[in-house]
């Protein structure tokens, strides 16, 4: 009986843990947004960003705010040579830039070790005329 319960618990954990991880996956798509400046907010919990994919159009002006949910982090996009300040829990920092390169890039936290630990997401710049 005890063995059955243990196996049941393991099976339960194997199903629930990945579900919980995927529940944090979140896409922000502003390709249909007609505002002059596209406002995007990205949070974080531990070593994960709350937004894992951002989709914008080529030429969009982006105002991105990173809201730190705890720890010491930044939000960086190397291909665009942009990053927020390194901030601590409860703080936020906003950067504004023009998405002038089409393609798929990885954004990440630039604090040593965090990118490798999975504090990353995809920044996708779609060329509507392509
Ligand atoms: Cu970090």
Image: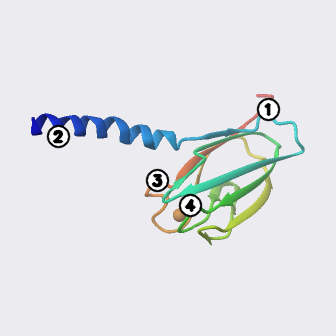
Q: Nearer the viewer, mark 2 or mark 3?
A: 2
Please give the name of the residue rendered at 81% of the width and 28% of the height, measured from the top-left corner: 129
Which of pointers 1 and 2 lies earlier in the amino acid sequence? 2
Circles 3 and 4: CB atoms closer than 8 Å:
no
With 104 as the anchor, is 71 left or right in this view? left
Which of pointers 4 and 1 lies earlier in the amino acid sequence? 1
Seen as rendered, the residue at the extreme front is 1
Circles 4 and 1: CB atoms closer than 8 Å:
no
Answer with the quarter of the image where residue 14 lies: top left
Q: Dot 4 lies on which element?
A: loop
Q: Nearer the viewer, mark 4 or mark 2?
A: 2
Inter-mark Cα distance, 4 to 2: 38 Å
Give the label on residue 118, or none: 3
Q: Which residue is mark 2?
A: 6
Give the label on residue 32, or none: 1
Ligand 1 lies under 8 Å from the Cβ of mark 4: yes
Q: Dot 1 lies on which element?
A: loop
């Amino acid at each position: 009986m005890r063995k059955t319960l243990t196996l049941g618990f393991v099976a339960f954990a194997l199903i629930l843990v990945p579900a919980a991880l995927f529940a944090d996956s979140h896409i922000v798509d502003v390709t249909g947004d007609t505002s002059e400046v596209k406002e995007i907010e990205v949070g974080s919990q531990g070593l994960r960003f709350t937004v894992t994919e951002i989709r914008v159009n080529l030429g969009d002006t982006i105002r991105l705010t990173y809201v730190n949910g705890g720890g010491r982090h930044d939000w960086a996009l190397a291909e665009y040579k942009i990053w927020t300040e390194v901030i601590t829990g409860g703080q936020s920092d906003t950067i504004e830039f023009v998405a002038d390169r089409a393609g798929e890039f990885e954004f990440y936290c630039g604090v040593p070790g965090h990118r490798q630990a999975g504090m990353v997401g995809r920044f996708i710049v779609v060329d509507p005329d392509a």
